[in-house]
Image (cartoon, rainbow, N blue to C red):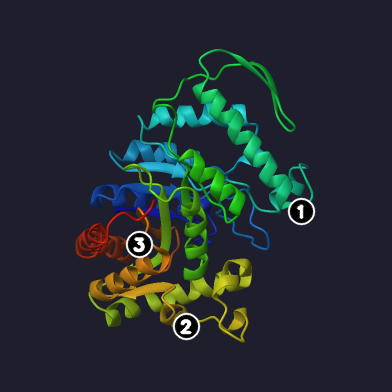
Amino acid sequence: MRFGIFSNGERGLSVAADSYDRDLREIVAADRMGYDEAWISEHLVLEEATLTDILPSADLLVAKAAALTSRIRLGPAVRALALHHPVRVAAEVNTCDHLTRGRYLFGYGTGKDGMFPQLGIAPKNDPELRRQRMREALELMIRCWTESEPFDFSGRFWRGEAISVLPRPWQTPHVPLAVATKQAEELEYAAERGIGLLVGANDSVDQVRRILAQYRKVRPSGGGGRPLIRVCRHIYVSTSRRQALKEAREGWTAMLEMQKRMMPWKMKDVIPPGGGIPDITLDYLMGIGHYLIGGPEEVLAGLQAFYDAVGGFDTLLLLTGHDYAPPEWVEQSLTVFAQDVAPQLSAWAASRGPSGG
C-alpha cells in the first residue's frame, strides 16, 4: 500500500498567500516523512462558498512544491477538462512533467455546475454535456501525447489542424492519469484504459464501495503493479484518543460547521437517519467511522475496517489543506501516522492479497 496527502485547500484565510504557504509546508513535510503522493485541489469556483483563499490553478502550486521537494509525486485533483482547450492542457501537463522530472500525476474530472455559466460555456444542471466535453478533451489530449506526427482533430467540441505538442512527455507514454467520478460509464471507461481513480474524503463508506465495485466490474485483476485506486479519508492521529480529541476537537468542529454552512453538498452522504445536515456532528461522524481521530491503534483498526468494507485499495490519501489544528500539530499527526500506522496497515493489507486495484 502507498500513502499520500490530498491538499483540499479550504482553510478560509483572508489572504490566499498565507493558505498557499501552509499547503506547501504540509507538502514539504509529507515529502520529508516519506509519503508517496500529494494531490492538490483545483477550485476555479465553489458554489455557495466565498473562500477568499481558493486555489484556481493547482499546477502553479505543484511547480513551486516541486522545487521544494525531492521525491514525492505531485498532481492536480482535479482539472476540469470540460472547461479548457485540451491541446493547451496537454502542453501544460507535459511542462509540469518536465519541471518535476517525472514526478507529475494528472487528476481530471468534469468540474462543478457553477464553473460553466461563469465562463459562458454551458448552463447549470447539464452533467451529461460536461461529461461529453470531458471525454472528448481527454481523447484529444491522449493523442497529443502519443501521436508521433502532426494530426488534425475535428470533434463536437474541440478542433485543430496539424496538432503537435511540445515538449514531449517525460514519462512514457504519458503521465499517470486518475479520474474523480461517480458515473458508471466513466468508471468503466477508466477501468478499460487503466486510468486510476481518485475517491474523495466526503464519500461515505457505502458510496466508496459502490464506486470501487463499478470500477472492478471491468478491471477485477488490478493494475499490474500500478497503484490505480486512491481513496482519501479524514484522519488525525495523536498519542491517544483523548489527546487527539484534545488537540483536534475545536478545529475539526469549526471545519465541519464551515462545510455545513458553505458547502452542504459535501455532507449529503453522511446525514443521520431521519435527520438533516444540522444534525451532523463531529461525534456522529466519528461514530460511523467517517472521521478517524484517535491514537495509532484506534486509527489503524478504523482503517482496517474501512479497507475490508470497500474491498481494498492501493493508496490511502490523508486529507490536508484544512486548519483543523495548528500547523505543528498537523505535522505531528502526519509523523505519527507515517511511523506508527502506515507500516502496520501496509503489512496487514499485503496479507489480505490483491485489492483489485
Mark 1 → mark 2, Cα distance in angstroms: 33 Å
Dot 1 or dot 3: first in sequence order is 1
Residue 302 occupies quadrant: bottom left
Q: Specify the amino acid type for callout 1.
A: Lys
Outermost residue, bottom direction?
A: 274
Above-or-below relation of 244 to 224: below
**For mark 2, what is the residue?**
284
Q: Secondary structure at mark 2?
A: helix
Residue 105 occupies quadrant: top left
**For mark 3, what is the residue?**
327
The total of numbered circles placed on residues is 3
Q: Residues within 10 Å of mark 3 (few under 14, many from 20)?
A: some
Mark 1 → mark 3, Cα distance in angstroms: 38 Å
| Spot occupied by residue 2 in the image (x, y as percentages of width and height) | 30, 52
| Spot occupied by residue 127 in the image (x, y as percentages of width and height) | 71, 52
* Residue at the spot 65% in from the left edge and 35% down from the top edge: 136
Which of labels 2 and 3 is toward the front? 2
User: Quick one: quadrant of the N terminus?
Assistant: bottom left
Above-or-below relation of 220 to 132: below
Q: Specify the amino acid type for callout 2.
A: Tyr
Q: Residues within 10 Å of mark 2 (few under 14, many from 20)?
A: some
Dot 2 or dot 3: first in sequence order is 2
Apparent side of residue 209 relative to residue 260 in the rendered image (left or right): left
Apparent side of residue 318 relative to residue 177 in the rendered image (left or right): left
| Spot occupied by residue 230 in the image (x, y as percentages of width and height) | 41, 53
Looking at the rendered structure, which numbered label has been put on residue 124?
Answer: 1
* Residue at the spot 45% in from the left edge and 40% down from the top edge: 194
Q: Secondary structure at mark 1?
A: loop
Above-or-below relation of 232 to 58: below
Nearer-the-camera pick, 186 or 301: 186
